[in-house]
Image (cartoon, grey):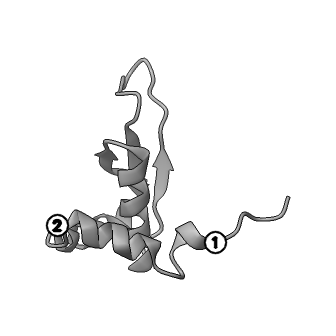
Amino acid sequence: MRLLMTATSNFEAEIVCGLLRDAGVEPIRRGEGGPRRPRGVFERDVYVEDEDVARAHEILAQAEDVSPEELIRLSEEPGSRGDQPPADS
């Protein structure tokens, strides 16, 4: 696993993870800091498998051409992770 980026908020991390998943790259999101890597309270690290790093960078570079409003709209479309009911426990 390699650190792809540090998102400034949980919301940003969720959008990034959604973009990656939609493109077939499975991210892992972590939000813990630690003595060796202090962080802001809302920052979230996004990791991907080593073999997915180049593809993930391409996906994020393409997303930079999309407005924040468009990203929000896409995240709210049916079939996005946000409209899924919680799993039964």
Vertical arrangement, residue 83 with respect to residue 79, above or below: above
- Select label 2 or label 1 by which is in front: 1
Pick whichever, 79 or 69, lies toward us: 69
Vertical arrangement, residue 36 with respect to residue 62, above or below: above
Residue 48: give x, y in percent of width and height: 41, 59
Place residue 25 in its image quadrant.
bottom left
Residue lying at the far left of the rendered structure: 65
Check disc 1: other Cα within 10 Å, few if <14, some if 14-19, many if 20+: few
Residue 83: give x, y in percent of width and height: 58, 72
Q: In the image, what residue occupies the spot 48% across and 50% down?
A: 29
Q: What amino acid does circle 1 point to?
A: Gln
Picture disc at residue 84: 1
Residue 52: give x, y in percent of width and height: 36, 68
- Badge 2 element: loop
Pick whichever, 65 or 6, lies toward us: 65
Residue lying at the far top of the rendered structure: 35
Picture disc at residue 71: none
Quarter of the figure that contains the C terminus:
bottom right
Pick whichever, 70 or 14, lies toward us: 70
Mark positioned earlier in the residue sequence (2 or 1): 2
Q: What amino acid does circle 2 point to?
A: Glu
Q: In the image, what residue occupies the spot 14% across and 72% down?
A: 65
Pick whichever, 82 or 44, lies toward us: 82
The answer to whether any part of residue 49 appears in the image is no
Q: Which residue is mark 2?
A: 64
Residue 27: give x, y in percent of width and height: 45, 61
The answer to whether any part of residue 22 appears in the image is yes
Q: In the image, what residue occupies the spot 36% across and 23% down?
A: 38
Q: CA distance from mark 2 to mark 1?
A: 26 Å
